[in-house]
């Protein structure tokens, strides 16, 4: 009988414990003060713990600079600002962002604002990378980019010298719309749904947050919408071209457009319509794809370096006789563990040269390797030539020079 | 010697307790991704085995001085018991105790009374019949008492009605503020209406629309309905799409509540007791998002035009919902539990709680108020202009927020003020606990009724014959008085192994269920194939773990047999008779006048009758008192066609788990020679401890790191809601072995109980969830 009573009492105690709810847990929370510093000057304090984040103010930005984020790092040169590790959100600090920076029994952590030179952007196209919804993936976008460059070249632009960014957005409509609004530099949105979706779920206002939104556009596997946000001359031209090339009945339009381009410029894409382009094999018409390991703390590389590298590469290829019309370049970041990168590169199947890896192997592929290349603060990085295309070999050779490798030095 | 034995027993018990503690420590380390969990798991196993060995030595003890071999074993145990300090101390004292007890306690067996042959009482005077009657009476009395609480002592009229497409077209062309709100399909929404007696045409009352969240029925929001209606508000509560008795499966728009509001608002015949200038709406979780959509859709251009004058958004802060704040033209409240497990999804500077709440107080009537900080429980704005905003953050988690008295008090106080209800009852004066308690009592009584009903039926010659034929096998005694250590190790190893598997495979299988049943897992796809999205996870888990349980049970039995045979052969002795009796209880035997088939059919019939009796009771209580049987997240609701059909898709497959459990409880744990309470306790713990550890791991991680262990899984799939289901599941899994054991004792076979429990528990689970079956 005693045992039964004990068991019943134990169960009752457990139930009571459960019913008292979570209140006792509050004792385990540790409040940390987050001190904000802008250009070395104290600008405020916030408090965070595991259940409470703090909203951070957006600091006023010096001229020709943009706010890059908040960091717990103490000292850095202005030149290397872009490589300073910043917390994930610009406007929010979480306990998980600063917990590793808490020293011993300290009750506070200092966050410092980081500013970088404002990048110049000629055109920014956002694409909806939630493939199940938009029908778009990186491969579609690479092809799209190649066609876009081809179109721009045909209209007298030099896309290689321009700052054109095609940026992926993932997540729900509301989240992506919020992110696009926050980024503030997007000209065209590719792959979202109709205007009701953007105004309803996205919380936008037509005429304010976007100018127009047209359906029946098939860049990937599904017919989706293309929305225009800005009204620059280039944006308007590209927006019109997207409708013409990818709108309903664009098969013919696209083909005729491509062939009209190929009349005076060699086609560089691998679309079937370009197969009549003489003197260029289908393989050669593919863009040159340079993969880079975007895990900066391991590879030493960052986006700024790769932009610099791209500019230098374009110049070099031009010197070697490759023109904008014959060669498009895709600089593609790969993130994650080495095995994941290997899988992704294998899956994509079009990478010519990979930079920034160390241990890197692809099943059934013999690669040429340059070892101990200095990239950022890392001195043991490698460059792998994956494809045997002539242009890949040329780029690989050029990458042996100090001139080429200077792109990977921190500014 | 007596004292020594007592000390050893105490040491063994301490070892078992520490086994549990080490397991909990292992679970905590696992939750924190600390590799030390292996070490603690090994500690747990060592402590457990140590307990067995001490018990074994104790059972062989003949004098205070142990034999040399036993003394060596005990010394070894003493060293190992360092992992359990209390056991170590006790073992130290016991091990070196060489003096016999001075006081010899003589335990005399009480004189065995001549057992008078029990005379069988007539059925109507038997304990089982009396229990049946008492249980039945308790069910009705409890339901009646719950009815008193639901109707606030008969001052509120509670009734149900069904909203049809035709009804939404009937008045004003289904229009409000120039927008049409007509149901697109010929489906229905189930609605419960609470009308206080103070509401009349002369004195129209404010109206509050209540909407539950995902996988919840309107009955789970009764606490809001009770507290609002007893304060003078007319309350309408509806089942959202795919849930409860609603036949519409779509969850788009405001999930059906907009049609109900339009119908009540435009209806000029039936709702004259409603003040149509004082409409409010409250919803929890997804329901919170839905009422926000409702208020925004019906906002018009001013507070005066807005149909909804007050909206209370509870447990929902998605950006898509926050984007609508600026369109609201009414007073609004937002509450989000301090320990809401779903918050891990909102950790960016556009989606975090801190950002969304700031938007909530700033984006008012299309303007920006410019507040930099957010104060909780503080009312911003002007109530008379519809710009009032208040934010609450109750210290509770997501799935219990709607049962939190503070949360309910905040809700009723909000409507009391914003809808000018003029109720003198303060928010913290609540009576809904009464309904919850009596519904819980009715649920317990209904289970007791089911068992007593089975017992009474088993007295009928028709069914009694089935048990008579089983008697020979079910009476097979346990062969050994004391099980060997190897048997104990195997037995407990199997118990722990199955619990560990049940703990670790639940979430991966939930994730897998999304891939295996893609159509059943989308709110926008209606299907006849396993349409209960959340239950698909339980289905996979039950099938896999049931199968593993069966394999382990039969596998270990065979291994034990092979081992003993080999050991006997090695010793050159004849093998002791093996305990094959455990298998015999699984077999349904032929009777004197009935074949195996007939007895099998009788077992099925008995299970069906119990199921029917249980749900008939639910049905009667609902008809008489508008009450179902429930306690918080565990409920038995009245049957409806959609849920009935859905449940029968799952029952055959899930039965694998139920029969596996019944076999393990009755043919394995039940044959250890323990007292009945110990058998029931071990059975209940063995079946539920794995799931309990899911909660432990999840919440240890959550409370120490701020994000749940089971938040995203696999390819970024959200699985946190599956953990919420475990709260109810763990209770059911605790009760299941107890029921299986009781039914086995009554029927003599392992099948009837498993079938009855499977049917009832699955029907309960499905009815309290969501089904996208397109049955209208």
Image: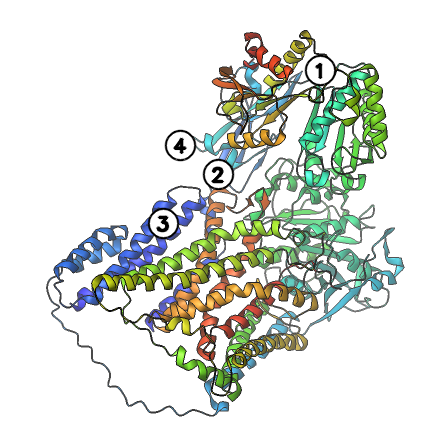
Image quarter of residue B493: bottom left
- What is the number of the mark on residue A160? 1
Q: Earlier in the sequence, mark 1 or mark 2?
A: 2
Q: Which tag is nearer the camera, tag 1 or tag 2?
A: 1
Image quarter of residue A79: top right
Q: Give whichever of A368, B174 is nearer the camera.
A: A368
Q: Are marks 4 and 3 in contact (CB under 8 Å)?
A: no
Q: Are marks 3 and 1 in contact (CB under 8 Å)?
A: no
Q: Is residue B650 left or right of residue B161?
A: left
Q: Residue at x 66, y 38 (%)?
A: A171
Q: Label 3's element?
A: helix
- What is the number of the mark on residue B41? 3
What percent of the width, then of the height, locates residue B95? 16, 58
- In the rendered image, residues at marks 4 and 3 fall on the same chain: no
The chain letter for the residue carrying disc 4 is A
Report the Cα–Cα distance between label 4 and label 1.
Answer: 51 Å
Q: Crowding near pointer 2: few (<14 within 10 Å), some, many (20+)?
A: some
Q: Are marks 4 and 1 in contact (CB under 8 Å)?
A: no
Q: Earlier in the sequence, mark 4 or mark 2?
A: 2
- What is the number of the mark on residue A104? 4
Report the Cα–Cα distance between label 4 and label 3.
Answer: 30 Å
The chain letter for the residue carrying disc 3 is B
């Amino acid at each position: 009988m005693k045992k039964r009573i004990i068991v019943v009492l134990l169960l009752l105690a457990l139930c009571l414990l459960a019913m008292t709810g979570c209140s006792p847990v509050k004792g385990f929370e540790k409040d940390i003060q987050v001190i904000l510093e802008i250009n070395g000057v104290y600008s405020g304090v916030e408090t965070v713990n595991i259940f409470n984040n703090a909203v951070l103010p957006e600091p006023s930005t010096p001229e020709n600079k943009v706010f890059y984020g908040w960091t717990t790092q103490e000292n850095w040169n202005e030149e290397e600002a872009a490589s300073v590790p910043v917390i994930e959100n610009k406007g929010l600090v979480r306990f998980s962002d600063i917990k590793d920076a808490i020293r011993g029994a300290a009750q506070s952590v200092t966050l410092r604002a980081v500013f970088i030179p404002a990048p110049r952007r000629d055109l920014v196209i956002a694409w909806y990378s939630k493939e199940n919804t938009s029908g778009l993936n990186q491969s579609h976008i690479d092809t799209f980019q190649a066609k876009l460059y081809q179109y721009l070249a045909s209209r007298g632009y030099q896309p290689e010298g321009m700052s054109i960014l095609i940026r992926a957005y993932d997540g729900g409509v509301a989240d992506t719309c919020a992110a696009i609004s926050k980024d503030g530099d997007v000209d065209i949105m590719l792959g979202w749904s109709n205007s009701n979706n953007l105004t309803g779920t996205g919380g936008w206002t037509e005429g304010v947050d976007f100018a127009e939104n047209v359906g029946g556009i098939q860049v990937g596997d599904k017919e989706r919408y293309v929305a225009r946000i800005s009204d620059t001359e280039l944006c308007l031209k590209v927006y019109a071209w997207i409708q013409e090339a990818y709108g309903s009945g664009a098969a013919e339009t696209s083909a005729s457009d491509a062939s009209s381009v190929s009349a005076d410029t060699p086609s560089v894409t691998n679309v079937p319509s370009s197969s009549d382009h003489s003197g260029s094999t289908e393989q050669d018409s593919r863009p040159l794809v340079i993969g880079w390991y975007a895990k900066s703390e391991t590879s030493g590389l960052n986006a700024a370096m790769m932009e610099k590298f791209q500019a230098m590469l374009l110049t070099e290829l031009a010197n070697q006789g490759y023109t904008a019309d014959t060669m498009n370049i895709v600089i593609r970041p790969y993130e994650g563990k080495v095995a994941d990168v290997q899988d992704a590169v294998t899956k994509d199947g079009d990478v010519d040269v990979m930079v920034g890896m160390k241990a890197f192997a692809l099943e059934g592929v013999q690669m040429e390797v340059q070892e101990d290349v200095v990239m950022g603060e890392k001195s043991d990085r490698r460059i792998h030539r994956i494809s045997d295309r002539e242009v890949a070999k040329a780029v690989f050779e050029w990458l042996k020079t100090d001139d080429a490798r200077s792109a990977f030095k921190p500014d | 010697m007596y004292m020594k034995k007592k000390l050893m027993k105490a040491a063994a018990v301490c070892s078992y307790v520490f086994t549990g503690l080490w397991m909990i420590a292992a679970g905590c380390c696992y939750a924190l991704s600390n590799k030390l969990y292996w070490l603690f798991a090994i500690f747990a196993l060592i402590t457990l085995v140590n307990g067995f060995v001490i018990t074994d030595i104790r059972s062989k003890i003949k004098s205070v001085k142990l034999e040399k071999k036993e003394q060596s074993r005990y010394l070894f145990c003493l060293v190992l018991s360092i992992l359990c300090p209390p056991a170590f101390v006790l073992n130290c004292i016991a091990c070196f105790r060489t003096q016999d007890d001075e006081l010899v306690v003589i335990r005399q067996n009480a004189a065995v009374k001549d057992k008078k042959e029990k005379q069988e009482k007539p059925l109507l005077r038997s304990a089982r019949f009396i229990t049946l009657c008492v249980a039945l009476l308790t069910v009705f009395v409890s339901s009646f008492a719950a009815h008193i609480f639901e109707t606030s002592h008969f001052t509120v009229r509670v009734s149900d009605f069904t909203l049809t497409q035709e009804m939404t077209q009937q008045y004003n062309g289904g229009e409000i503020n120039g927008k049409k709100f007509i149901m697109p399909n010929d489906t229905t929404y189930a609605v419960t209406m609470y009308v206080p007696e103070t509401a009349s045409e002369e004195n129209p009352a404010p109206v509050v629309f209540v909407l539950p969240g995902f996988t919840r029925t309107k009955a789970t929001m009764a606490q809001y309905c009770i507290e609002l209606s007893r304060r003078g508000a007319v309350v309408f509560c509806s089942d959202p799409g795919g849930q409860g008795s609603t036949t519409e499966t779509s969850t788009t728009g405001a999930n059906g509540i907009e049609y109900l509001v339009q119908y009540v608002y435009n209806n000029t015949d039936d709702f004259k007791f409603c003040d149509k200038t004082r409409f409010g709406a409250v919803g929890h979780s997804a329901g919170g998002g839905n009422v926000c959509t409702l208020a925004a859709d019906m906002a018009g251009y001013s507070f005066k035009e807005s149909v909804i004058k007050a909206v209370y958004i509870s447990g929902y802060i998605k950006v898509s919902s926050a984007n609508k704040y600026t369109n609201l033209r009414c007073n609004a409240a937002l509450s989000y539990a301090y320990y809401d497990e779903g918050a891990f999804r909102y950790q960016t500077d556009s989606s975090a709680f801190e950002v969304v709440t700031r938007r909530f107080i700033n984006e008012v009537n299309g303007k920006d108020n410019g507040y930099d900080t957010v104060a909780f429980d503080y009312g911003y704005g002007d109530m008379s202009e519809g710009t009032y905003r208040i934010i609450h953050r109750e210290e509770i988690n997501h799935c219990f927020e709607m049962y939190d008295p503070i949360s309910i008090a905040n809700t009723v106080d909000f409507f009391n003020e914003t809808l000018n209800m003029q109720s003198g009852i303060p928010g913290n004066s609540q009576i809904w606990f009464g309904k919850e308690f009596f519904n819980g009592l009715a649920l317990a009584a209904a289970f007791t009724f089911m068992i007593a009903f089975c017992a009474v039926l088993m007295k009928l010659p028709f069914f009694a014959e089935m048990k008579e034929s089983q008697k020979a096998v079910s009476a097979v005694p346990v062969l050994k008085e004391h099980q060997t250590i190897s048997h104990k190790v195997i037995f407990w190893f199997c118990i722990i192994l199955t619990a560990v598997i049940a703990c670790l495979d639940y979430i991966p299988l939930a994730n897998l269920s999304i891939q295996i049943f893609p159509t059943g897992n989308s709110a926008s796809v209606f299907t006849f194939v396993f349409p209960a999205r959340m239950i698909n996870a339980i289905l996979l888990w039950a099938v896999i773990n049931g199968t593993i349980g069966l394999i382990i049970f039969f596998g270990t039995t065979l291994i034990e047999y092979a081992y003993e045979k080999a050991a006997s052969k090695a010793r050159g002795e004849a093998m002791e008779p093996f305990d094959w009796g455990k298998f015999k209880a699984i077999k349904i035997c032929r009777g004197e006048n009935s074949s195996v088939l007939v007895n099998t059919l009788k077992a099925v019939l008995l299970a069906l009758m119990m199921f029917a009796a249980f749900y008939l009771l639910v049905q009667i209580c609902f008809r008489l008192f508008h009450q179902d049987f429930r306690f918080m997240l565990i409920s038995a609701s009245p049957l409806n066609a959609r849920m009935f059909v859905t449940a029968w898709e799952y029952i055959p497959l899930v039965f694998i788990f139920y029969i596996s459990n019944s076999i393990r409880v009755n043919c394995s744990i039940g044959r250890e020679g323990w007292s009945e309470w110990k058998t029931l306790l071990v059975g209940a713990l063995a079946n539920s401890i794995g799931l309990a550890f899911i909660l432990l791991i999840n919440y240890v991680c959550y409370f120490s790191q701020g994000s749940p262990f089971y938040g995203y899984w696999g390819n970024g799939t959200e699985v946190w809601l599956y953990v919420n289901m475990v709260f109810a599941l763990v209770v059911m899994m605790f009760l299941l072995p107890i029921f299986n054991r009781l039914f086995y004792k009554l029927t003599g076979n392992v099948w009837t109980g498993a079938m009855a429990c499977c049917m009832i528990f699955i029907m309960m689970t499905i009815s309290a969830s969501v089904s996208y079956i397109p049955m209208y």
